[in-house]
Amino acid sequence: MSAIGRSLKRLEDRPLLTGAGRFAADNRADGQIHMRVVRSPIAFGRIVGIETEDAAALAGVVAVWTAADIADLPPIDFRMTRIAGLEPYRQHVLARDYVRYVGDPVAVVFAEDPYTAEDAAELVFCDIEEEEPCLDATAEPVPFMPERHPGLLSEPATIVKSYGDIDAAFAGAAHVLELELKVGRHTGVPLEARGALAVHDRETGMLTMYGAAKVPHYNRDSIARMLGLPQDKVRLSEGHVGGGFGIRGELYPEDVLVCAAAYRLGVPVKWVEDRREHLMAANHSRDQVHRLRAAVDPNGFVRGLTDTFFTDQGGYVRTHGGTVSDLAAALLPGPYLIPAYRVEGHIRLTNKTPSGTYRAPGRYETTFVRERLMDAVAARLGLDAVEVRRVNLIPEDRMPFDRGIEALGTHVLYDSGKYHDLLERTLKHLDYAALRSELENRRAAGEAVGLGLAFFVEKSGLGPHDLVRMAVLPDDTIEIVTGAASVGQGVETVMAQVCSDVIGMPIERIRVVHGQTDRIPIGFGAFASRVTVMTGSAVKIASEALRDKACALAAPLLQADIDDLVLEAGRVVSRSSGAGIGLAEIASQSAEALDAEGLFRADHMNYPYGIHVAQVRVDTELCGVKVERYLVAYDIGRMINPMLVEGQIVGAAAQGIGGALLEEFVYDEAGQPLATSFADYLMPTAHEMPPVEVLVREDAPSPQNPLGVKGAGEGGITAAGAAIAAAVDDALGRPGLVTRLPIVPTRLHASLYPR
Amino acid sequence: MAEKHAITLNANGKDYRISVEARRTLADALRDDCGLTGTHLGCEHGVCGACTVLVDGKPVRSCLMFAVQAEGQAVRTVEGLAKGEVLHPLQKAFWENHGLQCGFCTPGFLMLATGALEAEPDLSEAELRDILSSNLCRCTGYQNIIKSVCAAASEMRACPPSADR
């Protein structure tokens, strides 16, 4: 039986269930000291001085550093989407001259004990001359650091993309619609906060950082460059990772600080942040305002669309460069034809926590925006919202569909899709007409219940390539070494299933090594729903090479013709004689090692797609929104492990619902963050989650990889804001009411009962 | 350095003689002084429940309790759930029902559910959901956690594991 397409239990789970996991804070080294970061209490200001004497004098304190102590360290560079003009806005590992958000690291304390380090950090006094903070990304740009960079303003770059004849589209339009829409500031918030342990071995000269995640190879190169060390003297090692969601594993100031300290102080240095720090220091995301104009014909077909949007990038531009804005600009048109489009995305800095990517970056935001537009078109023209989608969806016979635009430096080419078909299947699954009339009856009886539907296109499988190596070990197991990373999504199981499908060995005998920079020279890590597509394809290629090599090496051993040999259940068997030999035995009897390599390249991303449907009930007095039912329909091309795909989708939907209704980083007028605990930053609990139904289809496999797979990681979140907004409008009978996420009771109340 | 107190912590039936400051949390003592790192810290302010352990059979946020307060009481952590190689029904159900992804919140959910089901084996799904809503998970959307706990509850009713530790 094929190992692909089966809901096999995960290889990862046993240590995680028994308390034997090794997360960042679980690492320890003899003689380790503890780092505590002193963070700016001020949103924007000039640093006059930092007094560290009292902290340094505390018993147990080893050292206290400010920017002056590490003046040779360059700022943290971009990993992705390097746009000209962004460089001056990069963050130094400790603030120089200015602080730009509450939480900006200004000093670090090293002590023998974490409690002492925290005590000492509280003794550091930051003398900061406050300046007026900028908290609105749509306001006119303001000076970034007036004295250090005179004339440099808070708009590092503007992204412009377009295709089609936009003027012609508007010239003959029957209707022109204008909308302003906002997606609030929220982010991944994995349950494990960040942490790291760095150890410098004086004998070998090797500097090792434990607690790496997401992109260990890239971060190894960056750390080596920043500290002026040869690349082969820096090693990053990933253990268990307590959730990624885009924010984890990017190179943060604290990662560089622990490495620099271990190297310079000559002792292992451990750092574990607390949740308050995490909520003000790890990447935030979303936070965009979009101003749309659409030219629409009498049938509801969108002939042309323009968008001016503002991304609130926070205090600095971090490793993602312009990624979120670039993706938003490129993928806003989503599943619709929209023959003419022009977008201008303003990257704006403010005095809030710096932003990066969060699951479905740029797509969660623009799906909300685009689907709000489709609902507005339906309302304006008196059409059914589903019919407006039908009129605008890209037809199957136009696939592959060339968008004529670039995203992340790759041409946007929708590889495959049956959009109309998925829409009809979704409506059928819901028994849409019956459901609508049921809700109408409930509304007639006085309940504020409604239904919202939103279509989306995701993207997955970002290249450029991925390498895996595999070898048969003496105990007759296969070891797969990959430069991919695990953030808890089941990488080991999925890769083992792909290998098992070729080799026929049970997955329990396939071991997957990931996130170890000393085991494989290159690796691109885990982001952009790339692992199953890229690494999975490389595993398939390597497995086939291993199979062929096993047969070639077995031929003389079995005295058989190679064409007579097949690999069955982990043994090479002669079809004619029935004689067979195990892989470990082949390896032990051959002069050559039984190993293989697989390299997979991809020039284009692929584009899974789907539909979210939300059914909500609004409490019209208190303005709380209860999600009663939730459906995600998703075409993934092909599933490796349906149980894990469903797990990804349901988990992502929970985060999407959180972003739609609960989660928001609010700041006061002085730039003080008001959501710095889980009492203020509200994430969904088991109570807020409706039953989530998942309708996974494999109708449009990707022609761009040998498995036909597309990514599973993000489609569960993408359209949540859009679907819930539509459902709230419907429940209240107020089309276009929701223009901003999250839909919190205070704002909903204000729009329902204006003073 | 602040004054330290010599205490004996009993965790999973074993005595740990440790010396801690009065302010040291039970979670930190378990993790750093007893080496029981299966108990995780997700917020350190009592909301997320990742650090849930059983103290005299009751689920407790070990980040909100001081180690010195736990002296003389029986603490149980995730490391004590399985009997040798044999997983507890809850561990088994989480594995079979994909009740975990990254696994960071899992020890807290396991101990919360263990405490709840040992106290009251006949909890309904709605009651279990209510209890489980006191912990946070960021990966699963809770659906499979609830499914896992319900499955384990049936098995535990049919064949109760002894709570002798």
Image: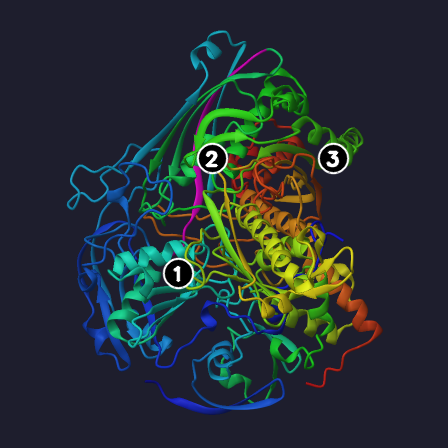
Q: Residue at x 24, y 56 (%)?
A: A95
* Element assignment for label 2: strand
Q: Main secondary structure of the magenta part?
A: strand
Q: Tell me the chain of label 1.
A: A
Q: Are marks 3 and 1 in contact (CB under 8 Å)?
A: no
User: What's the residue at 69%, 73% (across, down)?
Assistant: B114
Relative to the observer, which residue lies in front, A450 or A226? Answer: A226
Which element is circle 3 on? loop
Kind of residue indicated by mark 3: Gly
For the residues marked 3 and 1, what is the alpha-carbon distance in whole angstroms?
Answer: 45 Å
Mark in front: 3 vs 2: 2
Contact? badges 2 and 1 (CB < 8 Å): no
Task: Looking at this view, name the residue that lies furthest to the top.
Answer: A172
Which chain contains the residue that carries disc 3?
A
Q: Residue at x 61, y 46 (%)?
A: A653
Q: Residues within 10 Å of mark 3 (few under 14, many from 20)?
A: few
- Mark toward the start of the polypeptide (3 vs 2): 2
Residue A504 percent location from the top left of the image = 70, 58
**Residue under numbered circle 1:** A277
**Residue highlighted by disc 3:** A446
Q: Where are the magenta residues, as a range? A: A281-297
Left or right: residue B147 versus residue A589 is: right
Amino acid type of the residue that numbered disc 2 sits on in the rendered structure:
Lys
Q: Chain of mark 2?
A: A
How many residues crowd mark 2 within 10 Å: few (<14), some (14–19), many (20+)?
Answer: many
Image quarter of residue B75:
bottom right
Task: Between residue B131 and residue B13, name the one nearer to us.
Answer: B13
Separation of marks 3 and 2 at Cα, in angstroms: 30 Å
